[in-house]
Amino acid sequence: MSSVVVRLQENVPGKYYVTSACNGCGICFSYALQNFMYSNDSSYYYVYQQPADPREEEDIRRAIEVCPMNCIRDDGEIL
């Protein structure tokens, strides 16, 4: 069984984003409060703001590492 995951439309443009594999656990939000926001029904999270400084960059990288659904992605540097 193959399930396709896609980038959520609510993500702001930029290097980091959340896919449709998100289950709404909120771990990312606890690590990077300033970068993630939950949907209206709290069933998933998305990137609300791209990192603005090195501390936020580190926070979002930690969120990627601990995400149980592996749904936070990094597309690399945006030119």
Image: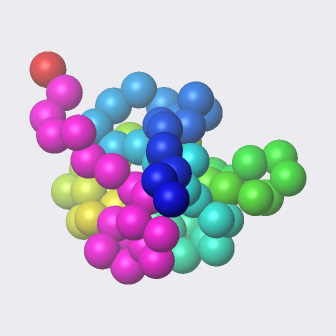
Where residue 36 appears, x then y in whole percent?
54, 54
Q: With respect to residue 53, does 75 lie above or below?
A: above
**Residue 52, quarter of picture:** top left
Compared across the picture, whether 55 is left or right of 8 comes to left
Where residue 6 appears, x then y in whole percent?
49, 38
Viewer-side residue, 30 vs 24: 24
Q: With respect to residue 54, does 49 lie above or below?
A: above
Q: With respect to residue 21, does 29 lie above or below?
A: below
Quarter of the image where the C terminus is located: top left
Q: Is residue 76 magenta?
A: yes
Which residue is depicted at the point 62% across and 71% down?
26
Where residue 4 appears, x then y in whole percent?
48, 44
Compared across the picture, whether 9 is left or right of 71 comes to right
Which residue is depicted at the point 50% across and 59% down?
1
Viewer-side residue, 69 vs 72: 69
Where residue 15 appears, x then y in whole percent?
28, 37
- Using the rendered image of the protein, determine whether residue 31 is visible from the camera's viewpoint: no
Q: With respect to residue 7, does 36 lie above or below?
A: below
Q: Farthest residue to the front: give it.
A: 1
Rendering colour mode: rainbow
Span colored in magenta: 62-78
Which residue is depicted at the point 23% across and 39% down?
75
Viewer-side residue, 32 vs 74: 74
